[in-house]
Amino acid sequence: MKPIPASGARWLLNGAVVLAVLQTLRLADMHDVAVYRAGGQAVLHGGAVYGFTQHGLGFTYPPSAALAMASLAALPLALMWCALTLASAGALAVIGRLSLPGQWAAARNGDRAAAWRIGTVLLVAPVAQALRLGQIDGLLVAFVMLDLLVVRRGVLVGLATAIKLTPGLFIVYLLMQRRYREAMTASGVVAASVGGGAVLLPASSRTYWLHDLLAGTGVGPMDGPGNQSLRGQAVRLFGSYPGTIGWLGLALATLGAGLFLARAAARRDQAVLAVATVGITACLISPLSWNHHWIWVVPALAALWNTPWYRRASLYRWLRVVAFILVGWSAAPWNWQSRPAVHYVGTGLVPLALITTAWATVAAARHHAATTQQAEAGATAHVSAWRSRYPQRTGREWPF
């Protein structure tokens, strides 16, 4: 792709950063942080972690997450929101570094494609919503990616699962990869967090593990347009009971397919694609996945960008359309909750389309590589046969 001047690339990058900051501040919403703060204050003051509501929402994470939130609960609400948002911004930098290595330097040197990728990551809808809400999903994604791709110890995967149960699917992935030591370490961290919560918060632990976890208390309406999991889609389409029954079968099939594809990606040295596949699978099969849970679209997009065929004109144009849709959901001045008919399609299907396209691209690249290898092998056999049939008599080498 034709590069633009380095000064233009810097303006583009700085503009994307400024736009992301302004968008976060303009649409800042502290309702979720208020729930985090109330859960942490309940720990500090000996109250009940579960059972209260803030703006119609309750604390839905495990007791160990409430213990973690207690470290920030003494701060004023606005300051706690700032702390969590800054932490999420740092986590986003880690995710971008692992998903798109070297892209920032390339963009500053005038690479238009790299500048466009970074701008998309900064403005993509799930990322923007997580930042403006003060959510912790970016931190959990960064923990998992750091552990699986860099540290390889299992501790960070265990911490992410202790805070929120969804990353527990990565323990299954570690077992499938025969990374038994990491899987056991992660399981040990989770077990320690459950035990610590039971000791420090016995009443709240009983409430969560024996009642709230199964009942889904405080999570909001399952059929709400913000729930972009497979269950949310099924309940909206077919109603509560038939939708739940259909979701169970679909979730099991999605779980098996997702883990199979992730294992295949890992075997082909597509580590980012493998991690993104497991993350998106976890969001799809979870009973409830809000829009800001889908930060896994960042490594999913990176998996597309890093495949050999992503520069094909048709695929590249389609990918631009998907990225602009994701950005548009976060930049639109209206509230999608007031347009449920449009929002039912939702951000949950966009990551599913991304990961499907990524796998189609990998399959096409693999077929192309196999075809090329067969052609090269045929050419080599042809040259060998030619040399054996017409031996060189002049002392000169064959020109091929």
Image (cartoon, helix red, strand yellow):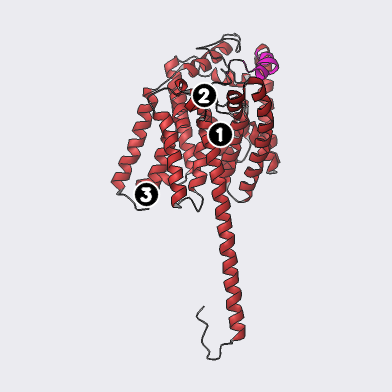
Q: Earlier in the sequence, mark 2 or mark 3?
A: 3
Spatial CA distance of label 2 from label 1 is: 25 Å
Residue 166 in sight here: yes
Above or below: residue 132 compared with residue 382: above
Confirm whether the magenta stretch covers residue 301: no
Q: Which mark is residue 346?
A: none
What amino acid type should be assigned to the residue bearing mark 2? Answer: Gly
Q: Earlier in the sequence, mark 3 or mark 1?
A: 3
- The residue range painted magenta reads 204-220
Spatial CA distance of label 2 from label 3 is: 36 Å
What amino acid type should be assigned to the residue bearing mark 3? Answer: Asp
- For residue 391, what is the image quadrant? bottom right
What amino acid type should be assigned to the residue bearing mark 1? Answer: Phe
Residue on which the image places disc 3: 111
Which is closer to the viewer, label 3 or label 1? 3
Spatial CA distance of label 3 from label 1 is: 29 Å
For the point 53% across and 89% down, which residue is it?
395
Q: Nearer the viewer, residue 57 or 238?
A: 238
Give how far across and how far down residue 190 sits, in percent: 66, 28
Asked if the residues shown at circle 2 and circle 3 are in contact, with their CB atoms under 8 angstroms apart, the answer is no
* Residue count near mark 2 (Cα–Cα under 10 Å), binned few <14, some 14–19, many ≥20: many
Asked if the residues shown at circle 2 and circle 1 are in contact, with their CB atoms under 8 angstroms apart, the answer is no
Confirm whether the magenta stretch covers residue 212: yes
Residue on which the image places disc 2: 226
Q: Secondary structure at mark 3?
A: loop
Residue on which the image places disc 1: 143
In-image side of 273 versus 179 (left or right)? left
Give how far across and how far down residue 195 sits, in percent: 69, 21
